[in-house]
Amino acid sequence: MSEREWREAPDMRRSVLGLALVLVVAGVLRCWHLATGLPATALAGEQDLLGRVVQAMAGGRFNPQAFDTPSLYFYLQLAVACLRFLAGAAHGLWTSVDAFQPANAYGWARGISALIGVATVLVVYHAGARWGGRHALLAAGLLAVLPAHVRASHYALPEVATTFWAALALVLTLRTLERDSLERFVWAGVAAGLAGATTYRGGITLLLPLVAVWMSSSTGPSRLAKAAGTIGAAAGAYLLAAPYTLLDLPAFLNAAAANLAGAAAGGPDRAAVAATLLATLQWPALLLALAGFGLGLVRSVTGPGHARWVLLVSFPIVYLGSMAVGRTGDPGLWLLPVLPFVAILTAIAVISGVSLLRRFSIPRAVRQGLITALTVAALLPPLVASIRTDRAIGAPVQRGGAGAELPPR
């Protein structure tokens, strides 16, 4: 009991059927109206990205030509566009790259974004399983229906991919706590490096394996070796995925300077960030997330399992703190990498929080009923909001021309 956290019997079981249902819901919400109105409904960011992708296909140039974000997502969409071109050529749609236009790539580009969004839900399930089966299912279910993640997964923008890498870095870092090995730290560093190669702020995920290094046992590989392996793997993965950071250093530095200039204006509007969190979580889940965060802070100090609790609460603190530096753009996109952590904290508040009532001799049936009620309260409002978001994406008013803004949350 001093080493492992007490769990209810149902927490020890995983539900394959439940996970399958969650993934189906996640897929439906992310694919609903995915290609409605294209190419007229393409966002300005999608137009810029896919315009550069098609230019790279036609000219054989792999320099992304823009450094507002790193180049991993550009290369991913370049690969998808090449597959789209070959698939179309096999059906006689075009016979040369010159006939291929950005409008031909939007559907597949958005499809890969939706697929990444669903994959992130699966990764969150595996992260939540470190706390229990019911924790995993509720955390994955919540991320599946959060409207900010649903909305962003409809568009070919890099933030959804960053969220995937952040969630994967969490899972891989949690694995280092289960078995202390240099190899596992290296893989966690690779995931963090790829997050940074997708969006610059994604590099904050390197905090996760470094915190694990700091809290790891000294009986295995030395902390210096694990830190060096983690940082080296992250740097190597970043440079492999974003090589023109060095190959076109002046353009990269100019973009970095422009991005950091946003700090002079004090960062984004904090009220807008808070409003975005409320819009995507809704009040019940937001209050539960705050309760889970409080419980996480306590467990970070008292245990058991100090390290995994520290990982879970430290990343949101540091990531939200980074809002004071650089431009962030749409808060609904900027906040996405935090959502996997928020979903797990919410699940912890519901499952672990209610399980604490056993200390007061409250019958198990009452506890199970309360867990069910809180689960519905956490999931239903975001689900309704996501359905409204999907309808807004498909509404005629959203088909208003090039460079359109993201639809309302």
Image (tube, helix red, strand yellow):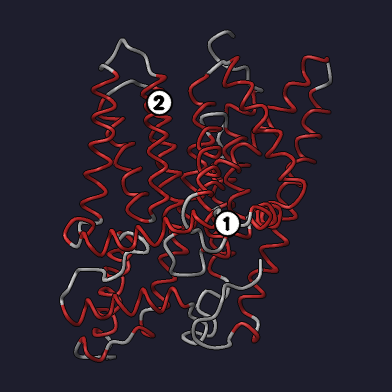
- Residue beneath the point at 37% across and 30% down: 210
Circle 1 sits on which residue?
268
Q: Quadrant of residue 219?
A: top left
User: Which quadrant, please, contains the N terminus?
Assistant: top right
Vertically, is 394 above or below 307?
below
- Residue beneath the point at 51% across and 50% down: 121
Circle 2 sits on which residue?
212
Q: How many residues crowd around disc 2 within 10 Å: few (fewer than 14), some, or many (20 or more)?
A: many
- Residue beneath the point at 52% across and 26% down: 310
Q: Position of residue 122 (x, y in %)?
A: 48, 47
Q: How many residues crowd around disc 1 within 10 Å: few (fewer than 14), some, or many (20 or more)?
A: some
Q: Position of residue 379 (x, y in %)?
A: 70, 50
Q: Quadrant of residue 388?
A: bottom right
User: Which quadrant, please, contains the C terminus?
Assistant: bottom right
Say how many tags the image has.
2
Residues 8 and 391: in front is 391
Residues 243 and 392: in front is 243
Name the mark nearer the viewer: 1 or 2.
1
On screen, residue 381 versus residue 248, left or right, reads: right
CB under 8 Å between discs 1 and 2: no
Tell me how far mark 1 sits from mark 2, CA to CA: 30 Å
Numbered badge on residue 357? none
Type of the residue with mark 1:
Pro
Q: Position of residue 86 (x, y in %)?
A: 24, 79
At mark 2, the secondary structure is: helix
At mark 1, the secondary structure is: loop
Type of the residue with mark 2:
Ala
On screen, residue 351 versus residue 12, left or right, reads: right
- Residue beneath the point at 32% across and 53% down: 197
Nearer-N-terminus badge (1/2):
2
